[in-house]
Image (cartoon, rainbow, N blue to C red):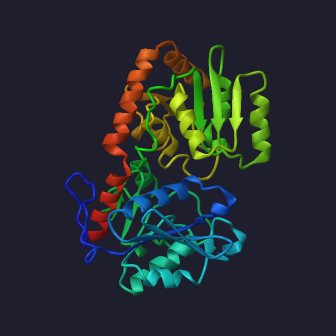
Amino acid sequence: MPIASANGVAKKRDSRSAPRVLHVVPALFDREDGIIGGAERYALELARHMAEEVPTSLVAFGRVERRERVGKLQVRVLGPAHYVRGQRSNPISVRLVRELLRADVVHCHQQHILASSLSALFCRFSRRRVFVTDLGGGGWDLSAYISTDRWFNGHLHISQYSRHSAGHRGKPWAHVISGGVDVDKFSPDESVSRTRTALFVGRLLPHKGVTYLLDAIGPGLELEIVGRPYDEQYFQALKRAAVGKPVCFRTDCDDAALLAAYRRALCVVLPSVYGAWGGPPELLGQTLLEGMACGCPAICSNVASMPEIVEDGVNGFVVPPNDSDALQDRMRWLAEHPEAALRMGRAARTTVLERFTWPQVVGRCLAIYAS
């Protein structure tokens, strides 16, 4: 079985004894659409970096059957998928069994989806180890009627908040593996000057708190909003709220454009709020980590997992939720204190390097798989 170093970073393993790991991503994973959401990105990046250590493959679902390689990672898209009760985020395919048979360890990336519950049952009966990470969302599943928690050998949470909100705090089978960033890709560029433009990156949905951020933009501040609109009516409301303000909406950013935005931004802001939808607002805050890796100070609301990432006054600021005045005050302070903002940006990258790199996450996972 694999080993991990004392600091949680995976070491190279003998391929003859290394487990074959399969990551199952029940959410839609379709490169033909040109869209990979946060949950898919997390699973893909974890699997891609794990493939550097042990034989690793990723199974996802799409319109057509296909295979590809991402570095050393084998990706198999099973299609055409059947969508349980018509839910696009809840696909299943009988071909999944074939992939499960090839694995020693299975890591599902969403608990409350039928594909994950069936994978857990199959692995238990076939004596394979099976783990699950909740990345938010869900659909119709057996877990609506009975608890499926112990169908999995372990729950690998991406934050302390995720473990707590799932009711798993203190459970020996519930672990925190955190999130990761590709720190070579997401890195500062000293030749790029910071602007007075705050940056929001994320899905354009009410629980992200974008309306409060728009209200916070006053004289001397600008705002760039990068994200895909999921609700056209809400998107139009945001555009009306931005009329007359220096706000730029970018709904089609690729990774290169996103990286450039992080590198020039005054700060990366995630003002998420409670109560805007039925689930937890932020299980991790991936865009905060990406911006911080680029040397960008972070501003977040005191909601869910985000205070686990942002240390107030050190690598950014934590403000009360639903508070436009507090957001404006902190953004204005960064704009008026550029040297302090640069120091915060350096501290932000240090935070990521010390706690949130993919090799560290891989090491934690492999140690848990083997325990």
Left/right placement of residue 225 relative to residue 129 reads: right
Q: Which quadrant: the N terminus?
A: bottom left
Quadrant of residue 92 in the image? bottom right
Left/right placement of residue 89 relative to residue 296 reads: right
Quadrant of residue 140 in the image? bottom right
Name the residue rendered at 70%, 73% in the picture.
85
Mark count: 0
Question: Is residue 105 something that shows in the picture?
Answer: yes
Left/right placement of residue 72 relative to residue 91 reads: left
Residue 271 at x, y = what percent?
57, 34
Question: Is residue 313 something that shows in the picture?
Answer: no
Comparing 208 with 56, the one in front is: 56
Looking at the picture, does residue 4 appear above or below residue 82? above
Hey, which residue is sitting farthest bottom in the picture? 126
Quadrant of residue 365 in the image? bottom left
Looking at the picture, does residue 224 appear above or below residue 54? above
Comparing 245 with 342, the one in front is: 342
Residue 267 at x, y = what percent?
52, 28
Comparing 233 with 74, the one in front is: 74
Hey, which residue is sitting farthest left in the picture? 6
Residue 356 at x, y = what percent?
37, 46
Residue 4 at x, y = what percent?
24, 61
Comparing 87 with 69, the one in front is: 69
Looking at the picture, does residue 310 appear above or below residue 17? above
Looking at the picture, does residue 114 appear above or below residue 37? below
Name the residue rendered at 58%, 31% in the picture.
199
Q: Which quadrant: the C terminus?
A: bottom left
